[in-house]
Amino acid sequence: KAGVTQTPRYLIKTRGQQVTLSCSPISGHRSVSWYQQTPGQGLQFLFEYFSETQRNKGNFPGRFSGRQFSNSRSEMNVSTLELGDSALYLCASSLVPSGGLNEQFFGPGTRLTVL
Amino acid sequence: GENVEQHPSTLSVQEGDSAVIKCTYSDSASNYFPWYKQELGKGPQLIIDIRSNVGEKKDQRIAVTLNKTAKHFSLHITETQPEDSAVYFCAGTSGGSYIPTFGRGTSLIVHP
């Protein structure tokens, strides 16, 4: 069974631009969660989607948004990029909702660099 | 909200030794505690998890113990091997928020 895939793997943007990251969960998994990983703040939860609905949201500004499609694929968008948004963005899928309470499978991440 | 502290930040051991990583949490409502291993250039991989109704869980060379009273849980790796070298993260999830909070990570180095 294929694992979680994320595209693109690397991305370079400049301040003020916006970016869209994509995540394809493991086949059959309907929950997708997004995380930001930085050396300074560690791994932080962004949001979770299940059946195209946002179930939970972490403490991030409204510039961070996401959506989920009927095939469970998910995208996250960051608008008006800031230097501090440089991070590894990880997607994780799980079979059931509330991924934080159940086994999650992480993708390799998208490395975003904001210049 | 939940606060998870993880120690040590770096752990260096000789091959064959045991390694122990400890985490404490603040929210007594937390009831799910996974441990992840992250190798360079990869996403975290779940290696073992424990729920609050269990005190200990073991999977081959890896074990996790949970002390609900003291609000701490630990990862134990026995007979360490060089391929165990990675960053390990603990996490705690409150049943109320469903949002996982991660520790800051432990870089485990196993010297051959």
Image: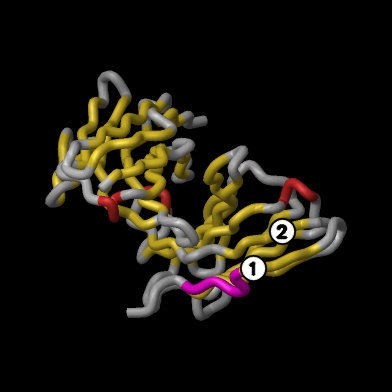
At 47% across and 65% down in the image, what residue appears?
A: A107
Tags 1 and 2 in contact by the CB under 8 Å rule? yes
In primary-sequence order, the first of circles 1 and 2 is 1
Q: Which mark is residue A113?
A: 2
Chain ID at mark 1: A
Q: Which residue is mark 1?
A: A10
Q: Is residue B104 positioned above or below A76 on the image? A: above
Closer to the camera, A4 or B8?
A: B8
Chain ID at mark 2: A
- Tell me which amino acid carries mark 1: Tyr
The image shows residue A61 at horizontal and vertical percentages of 73, 46
**Is residue B111 found inside the magenta-colored segment of the image?**
no
Can residue B93 be spotted in the picture? no
Question: Which portion, as a residue range, is magenta?
Answer: A5-9
Q: Secondary structure at mark 2?
A: strand
Res. B94 image quadrant? top left
